[in-house]
Amino acid sequence: MAVESTEPLKTRLLVIDDDAKLCRLIRDYLTPLGYDVTIANNGAAGLEKALAEKFEATILDIMMPEMDGLEVLRRLRAFSHVPVLMLTGLGEESDRIVGLEMGADDYLPKTFSTRELLARLRAVIRRSRLTAAHSPEEKLEAEIVIGDLRVNPGARIVTLDDKPLVLTAVEFDILLSLARSAGRVKTREKLLLEVADRDFEAFDRSIDVHISSIRRKLGDDAKSPRRIQTVRSVGYRLLKPGMEPSDV
């Protein structure tokens, strides 16, 4: 009679980076912590593995020869919503912004500590699992209606003027958080803690980038907002119908 394995299932992780030494470091650190790490040392091979196999998260380097990380991300997002954690150099802020707009879940500078890598990785995987399962509270939560904008927490659907909006998981969570507090200011720190499960850091622009993408999909203008107002040095506020941006 076959004996079932009692070993816990490992979390499958794909690392796409042309730096073989860094890949080994990541694998050697994460393997004892319950991760099954697959490595691809170029973009094309990584994309092929990402589309052919099932992983719970992907760590993706932006700067690679031939097919770079942004191209891998663009092609991957056409078929998959697997969480993507980008690795970036210190001077690649514009690439980080583009990557987040293309659907990356978070990023880390290549000067990261292993503890920071683990924390970010656990956060994106946890959020992905919650998105797939939906919490009982979200399933029971009523649809939030703000004028012609409707946010359904249970179905994780957003419609504007009865037309569905295509949002990434992070964008949906940010908009849901703002909708739950419509009319009130939500700080960047609070938003980042809620949607990324990590503390705000100086010069961290990830929330700003996601807000910019949400605005674009809502047809909103940051200079003359009708939907999402920027409260300088504080955070953001989702405006209720009839509210003026100056009504803080």
Image (cartoon, rainbow, N blue to C red):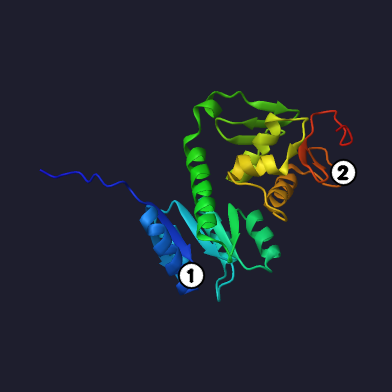
Classify mark 2: helix, strand or loop.
loop
Amino acid type of disc 2?
Ser
The label shown at residue 224 is: 2
Report the residue at 62% width, 39% height from top.
194
| Within-10-Å neighbours for mark 2: few <14, some 14–19, many 20+ | few
Spot occupied by residue 115 in the image (x, y as percentages of width and height): 51, 56
Please give left or right for residue 101 compared with residue 114 in the image: right
Residue 230 or 162: which is nearer the viewer?
230
The label shown at residue 99 is: none
Classify mark 1: helix, strand or loop.
helix
Residue 163 visible in the shown view:
no
Q: Is 35 above or below relative to 153?
A: below
Quarter of the figure with the C terminus: top right
Residue 207 or 223: which is nearer the viewer?
207
Spot occupied by residue 4 in the image (x, y as percentages of width and height): 20, 44
Q: Is 248 above or below relative to 80?
A: above
Q: Which residue is mark 1?
A: 22
Please give left or right for residue 129 compared with residue 172 in the image: left
Report the residue at 82% width, 38% height from top.
226
Amino acid type of disc 1?
Leu
Quarter of the figure with the N terminus: top left
